Image: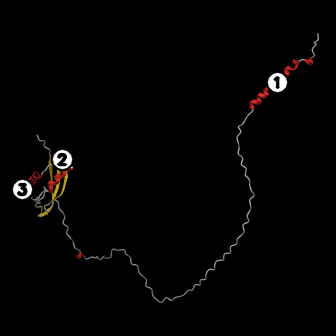
Amino acid sequence: MKSKKNPNLDVGRNSSIYFAVGLNVMLLLTYLALEHRTYEKSDTLVDILQMSEMIEEDIPMTTINIPPPPPPPQITEVITVIENTEDIEETVVKSTEIGFDDVIEPAVEIKDLIVEEVEEDIVVPFAVIERVPTFPGCTGNNDQLKACFQEKMQEHLKKHFKYPEVATELGIYGKVFVLFQIDKNGLVTKIKTRGPDQILEKEAERIISLLPKMEPGKQRNKPVAVPYSIPINFKLVESN
């Protein structure tokens, strides 16, 4: 049985071709949409440099006339020959070195020299001196003078001893060692002190400086300086 429809009028006979073409067109549009790129546009300033025609100036050539330097002066050498009529004495330079055979003459004669004797301050210890310094009022031999000297020294310390008030208030006490010299004139000199405090040292120095003038010690019948040391004990006593 034959179909009555005209095959040229069948709508669905090319549907598969149309579908394939439409699918390809859609894929192409999708690819173009994905690959499409846009860029930000910014205003760009364009400077236009206009160059004007340069005007060339003609610089005139200037010629300076400099006069040439003057010629150097001509020097004429004149040689004069002088006859040698005078005898020239040659100077002999003598050597300043001194040899073994040279004799040195003294500039000053020995008899013109004046020798001055300088007296030396001889210091003899108190323990070995032939005659100790004599305290006023002491007499006898050397041993008796030593004993009298020490006795008078103790009396002098008791007479002039005074405990400093500042040391008493501060509770300062201790032993002060005093070293001094009785010079060849019998005077007390070179007082040195060493103690626990300066207040006590000054008081000990004051007491020793009040010693009277003595007869100086003698060694071989010549007055000499004699050193002497003595301790002064500063002790606080509690009152009841």
Q: Is residue 131 above or below residue 44?
A: below
Quadrant in the picture for residue 121:
bottom left
- 79 sits to left or right of 11: left
Mark identifier at residue 167 = 2
Question: For the residue marked with disc 1, what is the amino acid?
Answer: Gly
Quadrant in the picture for residue 221:
bottom left
The residue lying at 14 percent from left, 55 percent from top is: 208
Q: Distance between the residues labelled 2 and 1?
A: 129 Å
The total number of labels drawn is 3
Tell me the colour scheme of the image.
secondary structure
Percent x, y of residue 43? 70, 42
> Which badge, 3 or 1, is on the more N-terminal residue?
1
Q: How far apart are marks 3 and 1 (CA)?
A: 159 Å
Q: Name the residue beneath numbered marker 1.
A: 22
- 176 sits to left or right of 26: left
> Which badge, 2 or 1, is on the more N-terminal residue?
1
> Which badge, 3 or 2, is on the more N-terminal residue?
3
Question: For the residue marked with disc 3, what is the amino acid?
Answer: Gln
Which of discs 3 and 1 lies nearer the camera? The answer is: 1
- 91 sits to left or right of 178: right
Percent x, y of residue 176? 17, 49
Tag 3 secondary structure: helix
Tag 2 secondary structure: helix
Tag 1 secondary structure: helix
Q: Name the residue beneath numbered marker 3.
A: 144
Mark identifier at residue 204 = none
Which of discs 3 and 2 lies nearer the camera? The answer is: 2
Q: Which of 184 and 103 is in front in this view?
A: 184
